Amino acid sequence: MPTFVQIIEFIGTFAFAISGIRLASAKQFDWFGAYVVGVATAIGGGTIRDLLLDVTPFWMTNPIYLICSALALVWVISFGKELVHLHNTFFIFDSIGLALFTVVGVQKTIVLGYPFWVAIIMGTITGAAGGVIRDICINEIPLIFRKEIYAMACVVGGIVYWCCTLMTLDAMIVQCVSGFSVFLVRILAVKYNICLPRLKGE
Amino acid sequence: MPTFVQIIEFIGTFAFAISGIRLASAKQFDWFGAYVVGVATAIGGGTIRDLLLDVTPFWMTNPIYLICSALALVWVISFGKELVHLHNTFFIFDSIGLALFTVVGVQKTIVLGYPFWVAIIMGTITGAAGGVIRDICINEIPLIFRKEIYAMACVVGGIVYWCCTLMTLDAMIVQCVSGFSVFLVRILAVKYNICLPRLKGE
Amino acid sequence: MPTFVQIIEFIGTFAFAISGIRLASAKQFDWFGAYVVGVATAIGGGTIRDLLLDVTPFWMTNPIYLICSALALVWVISFGKELVHLHNTFFIFDSIGLALFTVVGVQKTIVLGYPFWVAIIMGTITGAAGGVIRDICINEIPLIFRKEIYAMACVVGGIVYWCCTLMTLDAMIVQCVSGFSVFLVRILAVKYNICLPRLKGE
């Protein structure tokens, strides 16, 4: 039986892969290209984190992430046109994935003995770097550098994780509160169209 | 005296570097830029593989790969215009390189004790990721995501490697059959213009 | 009290981050995106070097580099329009950073026991790869592949480092001479508009 965290992780990986595959399909990628972009979106952030932390990339120990991305590809091939109607559902799933990935990234870094400021960066990389790799693969300027609060939600979640730990709360509670704060910041930012200020070009 | 595998490796590195340098020259890169793109094409895939496997990148233990890429640069500078007539020769060399790089990638991963599904991915990364890095450096959408069977030939070769190993064939035979299958898939795909289906954008 | 090298390092990091943030601002990135591009420019080269050398990325052991990049962001936000007049100052700072980063990269590689040809490459990566990552992030063809002597100054500095070491000069002198040669090559190349030849596209 999969645990609750595993189910969440599956949903998050699926949602991230879908986002990559859909953007690849808009550029007329073939099935292989779309799969690679989907996988890169889903596991790219965690892979960069694991390379920086010098541990074996998480997806090399369990094929579930690649299988999950393959299911996402089958899903998009089968129901391509109808996915537009599921826009809000994917947004919620993507936000759940973002929250979980951030918490996993922070936690893994702390366990390895790094200070909290490194853990916050690793949580943000885990959540948001996959989308940057995706956008580089499809030759677009990374979306999260220009629009919407996305990576900042991870930063907030990391800081909440830190504060909760300082208050010596139970580990399970820390993770839930942190993940929920990522989710909440992301949802509120989109709902109320909150953006960071832009720099004015010269 | 170089061994047979070393000669093949030299040819493959040379062909991969040429492909990078020629695309860089189409974008008016200077000699340095063209060399970097050539090197990145030739050793980029193996470098990503070695970083993921946490071993020293192969080219850092032997300067032959960088020298070989430098020879490719000298060649393009000297015979630039005439290379067009060698199109078919380069295609054959490139396919030989693809086959060898795939086999090397699969074998190295298996020796390190990883399961076969990881080895197939590493073989594919060794063969095909260099071309992705090349295309990102020249600011184009990676070719292998949109056209032709290229990385899929590596995947087929990896699966053949696995099947042959399951049949407990001799290691040398396994490698030859696997490499030949990569070569054959690549040649046939180009000859008969076989492509993967494309995703239809929304 | 910070040492002389630390002050130089601070200046170099600041100048590199400014260059990333200014290019990001020309593409209307938001504050977060500009910060990420600034950080990537400042620490990207050293991070790739450390991943290849299999040591902990330098910025994960000391938050000063991220703080320094944050100060660069505050600076650009505050004085954006006026920075144009400081063009020459930034050019000098950037060249100082390039020189120091190259020397640090060469030295770190030698200390780890690698041969000199690897050290020269690592010095060049430390100095110049950040700018490549910056240009990929803003979806432009990397500047150093097409214009000006930039990475070649690092290569020259690395070779000077090697020659001085062969002459068994004192380590401090070797580093100063090597760094100064990077600085000089860069300044002279810009002053006299010296470029590498370009490849003619087919």
Image (cartoon, coloured by chain):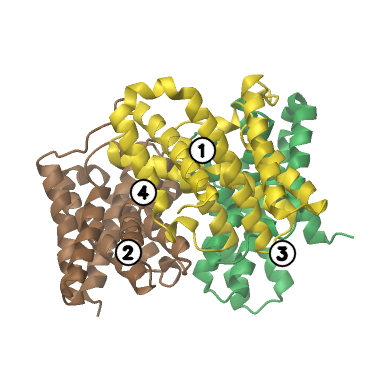
Chain colours: A green, B yellow, C brown
Calculate the distance from the C-alpha at mark 1 to the C-alpha at mark 2: 27 Å
Pointer 3 indicates a residue of which chain? A
Q: Residues within 10 Å of mark 4 (few under 14, many from 20)?
A: some
The kind of secondary structure element at disc 4 is helix
Calculate the distance from the C-alpha at mark 4 to the C-alpha at mark 2: 22 Å
Calculate the distance from the C-alpha at mark 4 to the C-alpha at mark 1: 19 Å
Calculate the distance from the C-alpha at mark 3 to the C-alpha at mark 2: 42 Å
Question: In the image, which disc is placed on residue B67?
Answer: 4
Query: What amino acid type is highlighted by mark number 1?
Result: Gly
The kind of secondary structure element at disc 3 is helix
C173 or A116: nearer the viewer:
C173
Query: What amino acid type is highlighted by mark number 2?
Result: Gly
Residue B60 lies left or right of residue C176; in this view the side is right
Q: Tell whether label 3 touches label 1 (CB within 8 Å).
A: no
Question: In the image, which disc is placed on residue C105?
Answer: 2
Q: Residues within 10 Å of mark 3 (few under 14, many from 20)?
A: some
Q: Which residue is mark 3?
A: A176
Q: Tell whether label 1 touches label 4 (CB within 8 Å).
A: no
In x, y percent, where is residue A122? 55, 62
Closer mark to the observer between disc 4 and disc 2: 4
Pointer 1 indicates a residue of which chain? B
Pointer 2 indicates a residue of which chain? C
Calculate the distance from the C-alpha at mark 1 to the C-alpha at mark 3: 42 Å
Query: What amino acid type is highlighted by mark number 4?
Result: Ile
Q: Which residue is mark 1?
A: B131
The kind of secondary structure element at disc 2 is helix
A169 or A3: nearer the viewer:
A3
